[in-house]
Amino acid sequence: MEWQQITITTTHQGKEIVGGLLVSHGVRGFVTQDPEDFQEFLEDTTVHWDYIEEDLLSLKEGETTVTFYLPENLQGAEMLGAIRAGLTRLPGENPTLDLGSLELKMDTVREEDWSTAWKKYYHPVRVGKRLVICPCWETADLNPGDVQVTLDPGMAFGTGTHETTRLCMQLLEDYLKPGQTVLDVGTGSGILAITALLLGAQSATGVDIDQLSVKIAGENAALNGVEDKLTLIAGDLTQKVEGKFDLICANIVADVILRLCGSVTQFMNTDTVLLVSGIIEDRKDQVVQGLLDAGLEIVEQRQENDWCAMACKLKEG
């Protein structure tokens, strides 16, 4: 398997925040280079050294970076899209910290090239009982009763191949009732909102802090002929959302779900179903507690590999 080296530029303050984002998206290892840490190391240990390489001393200069690797395949593209979306949220989630530019650089190919190079790995995929996700440049082999979701995800998260998206789509297929209204928080490529509309939802609202994702979601809605039923909002979580919804889905990450817990119940009716996904197994108990503290009860939990998803409702009484 070939791997792509990716580097994020941040600050001494931001390196832990960026590292936490990577871990929350399944990156198991990364390397941090921080001139401030290296300067402290030199001050503590230089007395014991007779000679220090000039290349080593050069680490005192420059910017703080976090470097990690993703496989050059569809899974890597999914993870990259999710990480990009997460980076756009970080400044708003940490307004008192200087996180730096959060610029993302790729080692061997430009990000623009990577955004299309992975398409060779992306083919029609069956999700759940009758959902088939098909890239717009392919033709799917459908069975009677199948529902095709056509996508050109670009650099937005959500092709249907990542465990978190599959889990949420499976729950959506089971819990959505025709004629319902849907809110999709962190819509990415628009895959969940579009799926809901194709399954019979009356209308859907998709929210994402990333303007690129909002643009891509609109284009994907048009590919599926549901653009007139989908309202897209560029904003942070539910800040610009109004009204109540019959079903709410949020395929994001644990930290953002915990933030969402503080506001999501105001958009729920007594029988609204909340679907949350993007939860890595190590954070599951923390998310469960956050949902319970918000006045919700867990109706169902599902897991695939290291990822968890849940269906919730307001506690009765």
Image (cartoon, grey):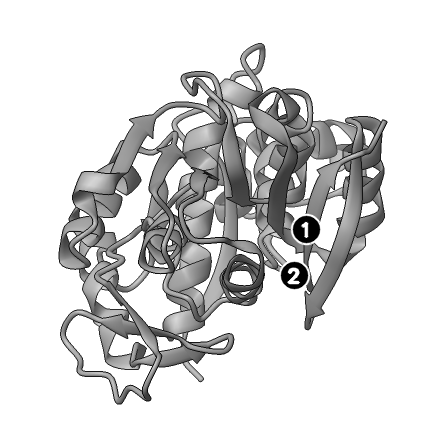
Residue 72 visible: no
Q: Which residue is mark 1?
A: 311
Q: Which residue is mark 2?
A: 28
Where is 194 relative to 15, above or below?
Answer: below
Q: Quadrant of residue 39?
A: top right
Q: Quadrant of residue 50?
A: top right
The answer to whether mark 2 and mark 1 are in CB contact below 8 A is: no
Which residue is pictured at 32% across the width and 50% down the height? 189
Where is 49 relative to 60, above or below?
Answer: below
Q: In the shown orientation, is residue 109 left or right of residue 61?
A: left
The percent position of residue 226, horizontal first and vertical second, equals: 21, 50
Comparing 242 with 280, the one in front is 242
Comparing 28 with 46, the one in front is 28
The percent position of residue 294, horizontal first and vertical second, equals: 77, 26
Q: In the shown orientation, is residue 33 left or right of residue 141?
A: right
Q: Which mark is residue 64?
A: none
Counting other residues with Cα less than 10 Å from the Cα at mark 2, is it few (<14), some (14-19), or many (20 or more)? few
Which residue is pictured at 60% across the width and 28% down the height? 268
Q: In the shown orientation, is residue 36 left or right of residue 90?
A: right
